[in-house]
Image: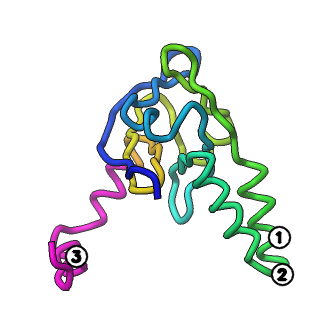
Amino acid sequence: MAEPLYGTYNPSIDSKGRMAFPNKLRDILGPEFYLVPGKGGKYLSVYSPEEYAKFEEKLNTITGPVGEAARRIYIAAADKQTPDKQGRIFIKDHLKAYAEISDEVVVIGASFKAEIWSKTKWDEFNSNVSQADIDAALADLVL
């Protein structure tokens, strides 16, 4: 696995719909990466080409009509990004609509991928998880 992605960043989307993607994450992801609807939430997953290939490979293991539908949905929605010289990307309208992104976003490193959330959805997600739940989940881990 490549170097893990971590941290929380709060870029904004400019009037032309561009977002400065965090340098620290770009340095690890490489000169291009993929935006894909997030699994199980209203956010966008951001994969390096290597991690996107793994994601697509896993999609191809799902059999039957549900697997076919999942491939169509995720692969058709995926968008390959190459940041401009200022490190900005353009999030396409269908991805912004999926993640309910307007002008305030939160970008997080999530180990092997990054995630782009609307600030509202990120705050909502965090308000639904208590520290007691997290402590219970981590109870058997040696940290």
Quick check: marks 1 and 2 in contact, CB under 8 Å? yes
In this rendering, is residue 27 above or below 141?
A: above
Q: Position of residue 104 (x, y in %)?
A: 41, 31
Structural distance between the alpha carbons of marks 3 and 1: 35 Å
Q: Position of residue 36 (x, y in %)?
A: 62, 49
Seen at 50% across and 40% down, the residue is 29
Question: Residue 55 in magenta?
Answer: no
Which residue is labeled 2 in the image? 64
Colour style of the rendered protein structure = rainbow
Hey, which quadrant is residue 58 in on the image?
A: bottom right
Which residue is labeled 1 in the image? 68
Seen at 45% across and 52% down, the residue is 2
> Residue 133, which numbered label?
3
Mark 3 or 1: the one toward you:
1
Query: Which mark is first along the chain, 2 or 3?
Result: 2
The answer to whether residue 47 is left or right of residue 70 is: left
SS class, disc 2: helix
Seen at 60% across and 34% down, the residue is 32
Point out the stretch of residues depicted in magenta.
122-143
Q: Is 124 or 77 nearer to us in this picture?
A: 77
Q: Amino acid at mark 1?
A: Glu
Q: Is 91 or 52 nearer to us in this picture?
A: 52
